[in-house]
Amino acid sequence: MSSQISPRKRTLHHVVPLTPEASQEGLDHGLASLASSTPRPHKRARRDNGTIVTTPPSSGAPVDDEPGPDDSAQRRPGFNIFQALMGRSDLLSEFFRRLDIPTIMNLYSISREFHNMVNLYFASFMRANAEWHGPESADIFRFKVYRHLCRPDPVGRPNPANENETRLVPSFRWLGMIHQREWAVSEIIQALADEGHRMPRRTSSTIKKLWLTMDVRNNYTRVGLIHNEDFWTNEDICLATLFFIKLDMRFLDPIDGIGYTGLRELLLGQKGLTVLWKALKREALTSFSELWQLYLRYGYVPPLHSRGGRIMGVPASEIGMGCRDLTVKTPEDPYQKPFLLRPDELVLRESIRREMDLDKEFIEMMLWGYVDLETYTDIETGETLNAKRQEDDTESEAGQDNREQNDDDAEGDSDDSPSKRETEVAGIGMGKEKEKAKGERKGAHKSHRHHHAMYNSGEEDDGLMVKEWSKQWWSSPSLPQTENEPEDEPEDEPEDEDIDEADPA
């Protein structure tokens, strides 16, 4: 029996030789001596040619407490924080929500523990990551609307509505769509702002709602969605109109433009805002051939004798099918099916149905981001500031050589010269007139400050209240009202003898 005991266990057996036959007195004496004595530690285990050797201490020999080269590896393996997270679902959720899509896919593919933990809480992890990277997009583009971007639950949880079916959960494709659209909308707003067409902060939510409306592939659902005042509020209708006006200002020349809105209608008639996003970034529609191909896919109806062939590289099955309501059964000819209503058409019709009178606000929407509505002074954009800074630098460099000469000339002039006194008096008078006009403008547009502050602030409010605001603005007595202004009295016509005889009039 003793031959089966390891050297360490055999040594401990000899150190405390308690047997069942020991008397109570011997047991007490042995325990007392054991408590008063200092145990002698064993030598640590060492690896010798692949085998672990444990050497009991010899009496009177010094004990070697220095660890060997592989001693720490044998006592305790290295700590792995990633493996430790696999046992804590709450910490793993916080770790997962901060990862990007490529990192998630790599870990999901190579780590079995990560793969199993994600499958166990798949829906929760997908929503947590989407809400972290794009809370607005996750709330607007809900996975239940995009059934084709869902997958069955990996662990097979039943559907609450039908226990015989497995419930659907958001997939990695839905999560990728959230990341992509959040980034695309922010770049659309930034691209317009770089060209000077700035918009309010809350326009991002409205643009995402436009994108969701464009995902609907039939007119019936689009009209029902735009009629939902809980989803499409009056503020969203107003901001969407502002967005369309800024697009027209971006695509048209402010001086030589003819007011043609075909490019905006073409881009908003697509299946989403991806084409608009790439066009504003100048990654698409950079040539006339790409523009013609997009038009052919949008709504071109080829003649009967040329149907079935490719036109400018566009397949026959894609020509004129980009904006058709294919859910309509009649007529059978696909080219006779009705067009899908564009979001700009839907917003315009809905504003008329709600009697918002947005046509009176078009001028203010055009001026938003360019003119301070309190002082009616230009707002300096990024390009304006850069040009002004370069001009100031150039003037400072050019004027540095002439400063000394100007100072010498100024010292030679008399301080009491009449021309100088007249200039100072004229400057003081002009300054007083400017201050007086500025005060009148502030008093006249006091009712308009709430609208301007509401656009610039990020705080939530009850809405734009377009009708009430428009009444206050347009009824301001200090503003020019052409309807009530009296006509100018006609000047007295000159007599015949005062007209030059050579004048043909």
Image (cartoon, rainbow, N blue to C red):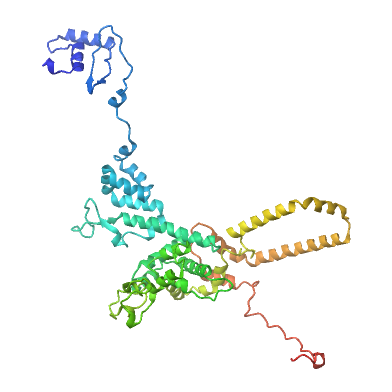
Residue 158 found in image quarter: bottom left
Q: Vertically, is 386 above or below 296?
A: above
Horizontal arrangement in the rendering, residue 45 relative to residue 438 (left or right): left
Residue 318 place in picture, x, y as percent: 33, 72
The C terminus: image quadrant = bottom right
Q: Is residue 485 left or right of residue 405?
A: left
Task: Determine the residue positioned at 47% across, 72% down.
Answer: 263
Relative depth, front residue between 371 and 445: 371
- How many marks overall? 0
**Residue 419 at x, y = what percent?**
86, 62
Q: Is residue 35 visible?
A: yes
Quadrant of the drawing holding the N terminus: top left
Give 152 or 478, whichever is nearer the viewer: 152
- What percent of the width, then of the height, locates residue 21? 12, 10
Residue furthest out toward the top: 60
Looking at the image, the residue that sits furthest to the left is: 1
Question: Which residue appears at 70% of the width and 55% of the height?
Answer: 395
Residue, x 32% and y 35% (percent of image)? Answer: 80
447 in relation to 338, above or below? above
Q: Is residue 231 visible?
A: no
The answer to whether 407 is drawn above or below residue 81 in the figure is below
Q: Would you say 449 lies left or right of 232 here?
A: right
Q: Quick one: 228 or 119, which is closer to the camera?
A: 119
Q: Quadrant of residue 215?
A: bottom left
